[in-house]
Amino acid sequence: MGIMATCSNLILWRLFIRLDSLKFPIKSYADIAERIFGKPARHLVNILQSIQLVINVATICLANGQSLSQITKGRLCFSVCIVIWAILGIVVGQIRTLKNYGWLANSAVWLNLLIIFTSMGFVAHSPPNYAAAKSSLGVDFGPVKTQAITNLPLYQKINGIMNMVFAYGGSMIFPEMMAEMRRPMDFWKGMVSAQLFICCIYFMYGSYVYAFQGQFTLPLSYQGVSKYSWQTVGNVISLITGILAAGLYGNIGIKVVYNNIIRGMLKGPQLMSGRGRIVWIVLVFFYWSIAFVIGSAIPQVQTITGLIAAVAIMQFTYTFPFLLRCGYDVITDAMIEDHKHIAGGGTVARIDSWKDWSRWRRGICGGRWYFKLFNLCIFLGGMSLSCLGMWGAGESIKATFAMSGSATSFSCAAPV
């Protein structure tokens, strides 16, 4: 999954380099899609981006709700725990510019590392949280077992793959990062350093926790220790990092809605104007309300992450880049026999149009046709896995709700 994610991001980098210009800059994933496939592709990307961001916010509200529930030892209704974070998100969401989040986002990275290293120490000196594993995963009490290849139902394996997609799939904002880091070496140093850092942490932390807790490992591993005091340390720190991350996701997600619907379709006011402020407040309220509904309706971190991975993250990282590269190559190969365009010359450079088979023949069969075929096959494979992931997430949600003692939608019972 990591290798394919690297390939897809290199494709996006190549497309960015070839399509970006001073007059027509590439600022987002939707810009790349529009340059190659037109307005409908832009709208599709924006819709999926909005879905991914709002469910990411819902996942963070759910995770913070679980942390607060553990801190209060279940004495506070779980739905109320989620409502508290939704209300706090509405307050934090009033910030309209991302520049105020800069140092907060940087501090969140170090706080997450603190959670990782402290929970590693806790896991090594504490038995698993058997009660939480039973209510969240349906795993009965017993000895810890670790396996290289597990004998699980197909839908659980698929949901596990989708959780890997959730971990590796960061391509949604990759073009935005490239747009911000115009100096090539700044971008490469930042990307390579971040990827190496993240991969090392993922491999080390995941393997370490699984080695100690096996089948009892929880999606939020710091909640999987038995000692209440150790749970509380991880939960309190995660509450801070969670609201920072939710604020960032929410800010970006609401701006996507504002720029494409309020400004683009409805011709609404500028964001930083007085009327724009009023519209922003209303959008923030509805956005976080939707996040609360999603988080309370599916109170299962492991399944909700698998669902959003299949619906949106899979597309941005493992399907769209290969289709975009295939479309770009078809367009550029079809241009080979066109006349040289002279600005202001008054003549049409194309010798034919997309209504003619000759142009399609040059685009499909010309140049490196095998490379275009390869990218098309990867795209179709990615779409197939995405559909399989949606099925797996649906079956996982169904199975989890069917377990006795599991949390249900909008209930007071916590999933951990």
Image: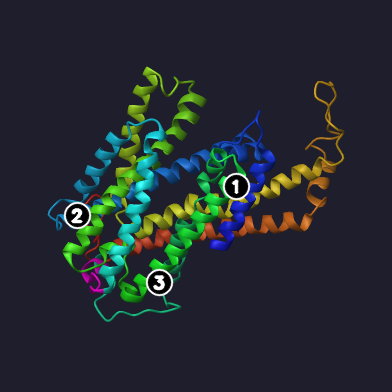
- What kind of residue is marked 3? Ser
Residue found farthest to the left: 75
Q: How is the model colour-coded? A: rainbow
**Is 310 placed left or right of 231 in the picture?**
right
Q: Which circle, 1 or 3, is nearer the viewer?
A: 1
* For marks 3 and 2 on the same chain, the one whose residue lies earlier in the sequence: 2
Identify the magenta region.
Answer: 125-134
Q: Which residue is mark 2?
A: 69
Q: CA distance from mark 3 to mark 2?
A: 27 Å
What residue type is disc 2 on? Ser
At 57% from the left edge and 46% from the top edge, which residue is drawn?
187
Q: Secondary structure at mark 2?
A: helix
Q: 28 above or below 323?
A: above
What residue sits 31% from the left and 68% below the top?
A: 120
Q: Label 3: which residue?
A: 207
- Asked if one can make out residue 378 in the rendered structure from this viewpoint, the answer is yes
How many numbered callouts?
Answer: 3
Q: Nearer the viewer, residue 320 or 18?
A: 18
